[in-house]
Image (tube, rainbow, N blue to C red):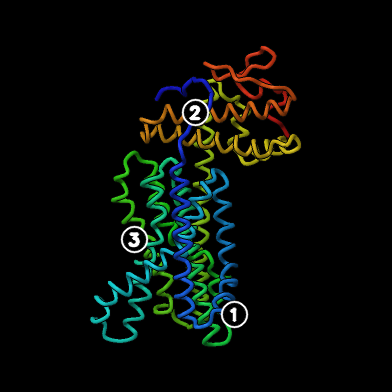
Amino acid sequence: MSAPVQLSPLARKRGPNVGFILGVIGIVVLGLASFYVIYILDGAIGDSALVASSGLMALFPLAFVVWAVMAIDRWEPEPRIALWFAALWGGIAAVLLTLWLNENVLEPLIVPFLQSQEQYEFYATVIQAPIVEELWKAIPVVIMFLFFRKAFDGPVDGIVFAALSAAGFAFTENILYFGTSISENGDGSFIFFMRGIMSPLTHAIFTAVGIGLALGFAARLRSRWWILLAFPVGHLVSALLHALWNSASWWVPGGTVGFFVYYLVVQVPLCILAAGLVWLLLRQEIKITRVRLHDYGRAGWFSHEEVERLSSGDGRAVLLDWARPKGLRKEMQQYIQTATRLANHRQQALVGRDKARHVADEAGLLAKLMHLRRAMATRAIGQPVQMQQGAPVATLAGVRVQRFGDLDPAWPPRR
């Protein structure tokens, strides 16, 4: 792989953002389909007011999962339109497709062979639900893997999209559980405690640890054909984790007390292991960012200290603290995100992904970096900074500079 290109940092003209347009169309379609989901919930629960109040209850576990996912996504934020699509897909399309496949395909084929109500309940809960639900929750991850690989860098991205899709699905499912429990028993506190307090992350963990990780690791490989192996393996893991949770009432002795023991012995350690795995993957992303930005540092685009600031959480906080009093926080956030995307893009090129477009895409990211540098430098030092064509430099009072630090001796800011 050659060194990072040296280019004129003039911004390229871009056509319409096809991904954004498709995302908006998808969200609009899902929004319209949500009315049918509400209709189904109203029919199942039997009270529109109860559906609304159950929806408010279901917002609590949803908010917690979304907060956790956004914390994971902070290092290299994914496009917001894609995140919204993933969550809405899980809460609307995945629910409708699950109901359709169960009622029109699987149950007519399987139920006639079941001998008792207990066999049906075991089949529906432990076999059908994990397989079908994890299949449809996986679709946003599959879409990102196949069609938007520039925004899909690795396992952390897979976890983010999978977890949001699962969170949306759990939200709709929780409305049904909460509403049904209140309608039948007059009290939904126990089911709210079980699903909203004890296990808000279960659906997210099932889908993220299986499908999310499998397609995320496959995304680091050159060929899209790896999905033929990654998807079945990931789906199997997700379905098995889901089945382990759903089957507890069949094999865990001791009733409610036994279930709580199982929860502490099995599910809590699984959650801790999932959190530890995410932490390790985030550390790996930070390492990749640092190594790849040092490639550009050796080519003259960044100073060593600037790379260190851009490739650590504490360093980024220092940069943002420096930018805030100057009114440059938004520009600094864009600068940090663009540098991170540049590092990930170079990593993709080094492993053989998107080689044909590497130079052009790299040029666009570097041009954006230089544009942001010029804007920040102009406002920070109080006089215009012009870009010089033909080299990755800016000019200030006739002095050629390659890095923002050449404009400001105090750059990068120190503690």
Considering only order in the chain, which callout, 2 or 3, is on the residue closer to the N terminus?
A: 2
Asked whether residue 117 is in view, the answer is: yes
Q: Which residue is mark 3?
A: 236
How far across and down, in percent of the image, does residue 166 sit? Answer: 46, 62
- Of badges 2 and 1, the one in the foreground is 2
Q: Is residue 157 above or below residue 325?
A: below
| Quadrant housing residue 77 | top right
How far across and down, in percent of the image, does residue 385 sit? Answer: 66, 21
Q: Which residue is mark 1?
A: 189
Q: Residue at x 48, y 62 (%)?
A: 31
Q: Residues within 10 Å of mark 1 (few under 14, many from 20)?
A: few
Q: Spatial distance from mark 1 to mark 3, Cα to Cα?
A: 33 Å
Q: Spatial distance from mark 3 to mark 2, Cα to Cα?
A: 44 Å
Left or right, residue 22 beside residue 396 = left
How far across and down, in percent of the image, does residue 172 sit? Answer: 49, 69
* Amino acid on which disc 2 is placed: Arg
* Amino acid on which disc 1 is placed: Ser
Q: Residues within 10 Å of mark 2 (few under 14, many from 20)?
A: few
Q: Is residue 280 above or below residue 171?
A: above
Left or right, residue 81 beside residue 382 = left
Q: Which residue is mark 2?
A: 12
Quadrant of the image for the N terminus? top left
- Of badges 1 and 3, the one in the foreground is 1
Quadrant of the image for the C terminus? top right
Residue placed most toward the observer, 142 or 289: 142
Say whether marks 3 and 2 touch (CB < 8 Å).
Answer: no
Q: Residue at x 74, y 24 (%)?
A: 381
Q: Residues within 10 Å of mark 3 (few under 14, many from 20)?
A: some
Circle 3 sits in a helix, a strand or a loop, which is it?
helix
Residue 260 is labelled as: none
Considering only order in the chain, which callout, 3 or 1, is on the residue closer to the N terminus?
A: 1
